[in-house]
Amino acid sequence: MGMTHVDIVVANVSEPDAGEKIRFLVDSGATYSVVPAEVLMRLGIKPLNEQVFKLANGDRISRKKGAAVFRLDTRIGAAHVVFGEAGDSNLLGTLTLAALGLSLDPLKRELNELPMLL
């Protein structure tokens, strides 16, 4: 199975025009996106709470969680973000994809426009 990577700008919701470009692995099995904590802190993004997450191997870990703006070309959206620690991968989760109006085609491993329904 192939992997899909994408470069996305992450920014503070109070300064959405200033941000940092991050390379993400698109993970359709992840709910939240993971960004290195040092990047989020540099952008002035503060943790809102801490949450326990279950990994694919069954392990449980605790991570801080906040909110960030994500920009891909002309698409912009806000979503929760997990403060990644040493050894964590930069992941782009499904809530961020939806905030950007995108979905991952699991067979072609490419991003497609998400039909927006109210």
Image (tube, rainbow, N blue to C red):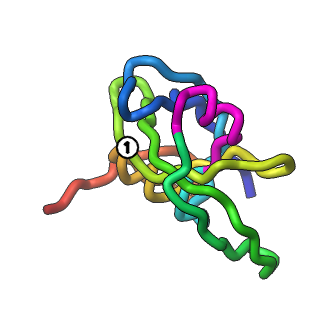
- Residue of label 1: 78
Residue in view at x 46 percent, y 41 percent = 68
Give x and y (percent) for residue 39.
Answer: 66, 31
Helix or strand or loop: what does disc 1 sit on?
strand
- The relative height of residue 43 versus residue 107 in the rendered view (above or below) is above
- The relative height of residue 98 versus residue 78 in the rendered view (above or below) is below
Give x and y (percent) for residue 43.
Answer: 55, 27
Residue in view at x 39 percent, y 24 percent = 15
Residue in view at x 34 percent, y 25 percent = 74
Residue in view at x 22 percent, y 54 percent = 116
Mark 1 residue type: Ala
Q: Which residues are magenta?
A: 34-45
Residue placed most toward the observer, 89 or 109 = 89
Furthest toward the right, the residue is 87
Residue 40 left/right relative to 86: left
Give x and y (percent) for residue 7.
Answer: 59, 30
Residue 45 left/right relative to 64: left
For residue 8, which quarter of the picture? top right
Furthest toward the top, the residue is 18
Q: Is residue 66 visible?
A: yes
Give x and y (percent) for residue 93.
Answer: 54, 55
Task: Let me know if residue 38 is in the magenta part.
Answer: yes
Task: Let me know if residue 1 is in the magenta part.
Answer: no
Quadrant (top left/top right/bottom left/bottom right) for the C terminus: bottom left
- The relative height of residue 13 versus residue 108 in the rendered view (above or below) is above
- The relative height of residue 8 versus residue 79 in the rendered view (above or below) is above
For residue 42, which quarter of the picture? top right
Furthest toward the bottom, the residue is 58
Number of callouts: 1
Q: Is residue 4 visible?
A: no
